[in-house]
Amino acid sequence: MTRTIKVESKYANIGNKIKARRKLLKITQKQCADYIGCTAQQIQKYEDGVSRISLSNFLKICEAINTHPSFFLNDFSFKESEANYDENMESKLLSAFRSIQNKAIRARVLEIVEAIISTTNTSG
């Protein structure tokens, strides 16, 4: 007998991102589970979107895979006051910045961004 499992798309989306990030970092489901205090099967359920993740476990998973919680929420629509705000772009930029290991390069990237902002704000 085949068992049908209802997967809510928002949980599946978060789960897919957790899985992709975990695999990118070469962290096993067991290692992630050990870090947050659950079973590898529970991590699999989170990744498949079958189980909802409690806030405390979600934050622990974010720690385990070194990722800011906002990364997982960029596909949800939230009301934003600025018309030009792009959550997906922000998430990609933040993820890319965090992947830079060299602190000097990170500092230089920040200087460049601040210079762009300064130029943009003064030129109207």
Image: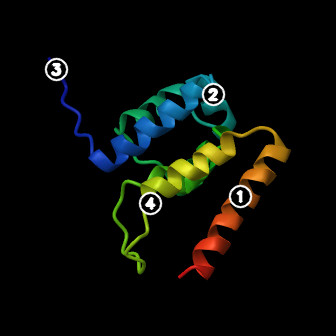
Q: Mark 4 vs mark 3: give the one in front.
A: 4
Marks 4 and 3 sit apart, C-alpha to C-alpha, by 39 Å
Q: Earlier in the sequence, mark 3 or mark 2?
A: 3
Question: What is the x, y in percent for residue 28?
Answer: 59, 22
Residue at the spot of label 2: 25
Q: Mark 3 vs mark 2: give the one in front.
A: 2
Query: Observer-nearest residue: 6 or 115?
Result: 115
Question: What is the x, y in percent for residue 27?
Answer: 63, 25
Q: Residue at x 37, y 54 (%)?
A: 75
Q: Amino acid at mark 3?
A: Thr
Q: Residue furthest right?
A: 104
Question: What is the x, y in percent for residue 87?
Answer: 44, 60
Q: Mark 2 vs mark 1: give the one in front.
A: 1
Q: Earlier in the sequence, mark 2 or mark 4?
A: 2
Q: Earlier in the sequence, mark 1 or mark 4?
A: 4
Residue at the spot of label 1: 112
Marker disc for residue 2: 3
Marks 1 and 4 sit apart, C-alpha to C-alpha, by 21 Å
Q: Earlier in the sequence, mark 4 or mark 3?
A: 3
Marks 3 and 1 sit apart, C-alpha to C-alpha, by 56 Å
Label 1: state its secondary structure: helix
Q: Quadrant of the N terminus?
A: top left
